[in-house]
Structure formats: C-alpha cells, structure tokens
C-alpha cells in the first residue's frame, strides 16, 4: 500500500488567563512529523513553566521517524526522558513538587495515537460528533468511575487533583489510545483552562465552523470573557487530505487497542 501524506489545517494559542501571573502551559506544533502536544505545568515559582517546557522541548527533538510505529515509540521515549529531567529539577529545588500534564497527538499513515498523563485533553470530532479520546487522570474521575459520585455532583467541585503527571514518579504512567484518522476529522488538544469555561458542545461548534486558527482564537476569547481563571492552551488539527485505502492493521497498533 502506498501512503498519501496527510495535509492539515492547524491552529494554536496559549495565554496566561486573567488570574494567573504566569503562563505555566506550553504547546508544540510539529506538523512536519505529525505531532502536536499540550503540557500544563505545576509547581509555582517558575517550576511549572519549566516542567511543561521540558516536555515540549523533549518532544521537539524528535526527528523524522521512518514509520508510524517508530514515531510512537520515540514519542514515548522522549516523555520518559522528560520525566527524568523534571525529577532532577525537583531534586535541585529540595524536593519541591514539580510536574506537568502531557497530552500528545500523533497522526500518520491514516491513523492517530493519543498519549497522555493528567487532565489535559484530546478530543476527536468525527462526522459532526465530539468524543473525548483521553480521559482525565484525576481524583474526581476515579470517584465517578467507582460510582461514588455522579458527573452532576461534581459540576461545581472546587478542587480536582490529578492522579498522574510527568515528573512526579520514577516510573510514570502514560495512557495510549490509537484509531483511524478519517478525512475532515478534527482533533482538539487543550489544557483544563479551556474546559473550565467551555462545554464540549461549544468546543464542537467553534471547531467545525471556523478555520483552525480562528477557532483557537475565538475559544480563547470566550474563555477569557468567562473569567480566564487558569492558563488556557488550545491546539486544533484538521485532517484535510483523503487517505489511501485501508490497511489491514494499524501501523500504530498496540498489543491492546482501546
């Protein structure tokens, strides 16, 4: 099978918001290799933005892997490397908690892979429907999954600690989901500064009706109008070029595909 390289309409934006003095979010756009990422740092005193920047700089060092599987493997390797660098940063700061979320999207050869830790999200909009590909690694999501709370119960919950992050453990846990990427699919990668202010249906409406950069700018403006309580980072990727015929097995396939 001959793979037709995909072309993309891509937009990105990051902003400190209206409350935080510092923007601890970072994002990466590497359309040349089919890689995009958002990282939301934590730790304060410049540590959070350093942690998120370590993640995107580690990923940015990826060259041009020969295959989709190589791209996924190298991405995971870079995330583990970033984890060790952030742990070293924490040690330099006398054990202060330093870390960052990571939400990474890879698209190649008609398939996507989503790799994440924390509560930064990846959405897929396919044929007019929005689906959250990632799921939040957070205490509230665990309680909801256990049936202890409903989503309505936690609608206005003041705090939601994350349960996974980059740079907080020697052996970090990343989750991976893979699937087909169809023509006109739209991916939205964002920090929780966006989802604190916009519902999924609003993200859908903006993403499907505007070009990628305009949609990013409009959603940022809306989040700021609604208070801008946190740093806001958005990356939108729309797949433009029709892919070639279906392969029998995903080149990004894992032993267990979710």
Image (tube, rainbow, N blue to C red):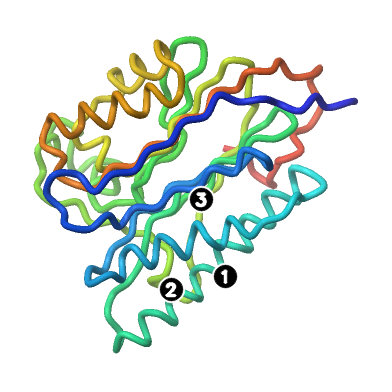
Disc 2 marks which residue? 86
Secondary structure type for disc 3? strand
| Quarter assignment of residue 179 | top right
176 and 145: which is toward the camera: 176
Q: Quadrant of the N terminus?
A: top right
Q: Tell me which numbered mark, 3 or 2, is placed earlier along the sequence.
A: 2
| Numbered circle sitting on residue 175 | 3
**At 69% from the left edge and 47% from the top edge, which residue is drawn?**
255
Q: Of tags 3 and 2, which is closer to the observer?
A: 2
Disc 1 marks which residue? 81
Gap between marks 3 and 2 measured at Cα: 19 Å
Q: Vertical placement of 61 versus 246: above or below?
A: below
Q: Of tags 1 and 3, which is closer to the observer?
A: 1
Secondary structure type for disc 1? helix
**How far from the left and from the top, in percent, is residue 224?**
17, 34
Secondary structure type for disc 2? helix
Q: Vertical placement of 41 versus 64: above or below?
A: below
> Quick one: label 1, few (<14), some, or many (20+) residues within 10 Å?
some
Q: Quadrant of the C terminus?
A: top right
Tag count: 3
**How far from the left and from the top, in percent, is residue 214?**
38, 22
Q: Vertical placement of 239 versus 122: above or below?
A: above
Q: Tell me which numbered mark, 1 or 3, is placed earlier along the sequence.
A: 1
**How far from the left and from the top, in percent, is residue 211?**
45, 18
**How far from the left and from the top, in percent, is residue 156?**
9, 38
């Amino acid at each position: 099978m001959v793979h037709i390289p995909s072309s993309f309409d891509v937009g990105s934006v990051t902003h400190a918001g209206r409350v935080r003095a510092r923007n601890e979010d970072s994002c990466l756009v590497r359309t040349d290799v089919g890689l995009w990422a958002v990282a939301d740092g934590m730790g304060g005193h410049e540590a959070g933005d350093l942690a998120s920047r370590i993640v995107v700089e580690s990923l940015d060092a990826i060259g041009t892997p020969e295959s989709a599987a190589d791209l996924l493997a190298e991405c995971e390797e870079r995330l583990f490397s970033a984890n060790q660098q952030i742990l070293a940063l924490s040690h330099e700061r006398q054990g202060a908690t330093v870390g960052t979320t990571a939400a990474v999207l890879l698209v190649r050869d008609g398939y996507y892979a989503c790799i994440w830790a924390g509560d930064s999200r990846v959405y897929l909009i396919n044929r007019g429907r929005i689906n959250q590909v990632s799921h939040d690694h957070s205490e509230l999501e665990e309680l909801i999954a256990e049936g202890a709370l409903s989503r309505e119960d936690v609608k206005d919950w003041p705090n939601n600690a994350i349960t996974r992050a980059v740079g907080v453990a020697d052996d970090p846990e990343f989750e991976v989901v893979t699937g087909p990427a169809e023509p006109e699919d739209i991916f939205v990668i964002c920090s929780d500064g966006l989802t604190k202010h916009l519902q999924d249906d609003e993200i859908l409406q903006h993403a499907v009706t505007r070009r990628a950069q305009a949609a990013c700018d409009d959603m940022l403006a809306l989040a700021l109008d609604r208070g801008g309580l946190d740093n806001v980072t958005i990356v939108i990727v729309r797949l433009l070029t029709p892919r070639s015929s279906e392969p029998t097995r995903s080149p990004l396939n894992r032993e267990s595909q979710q």
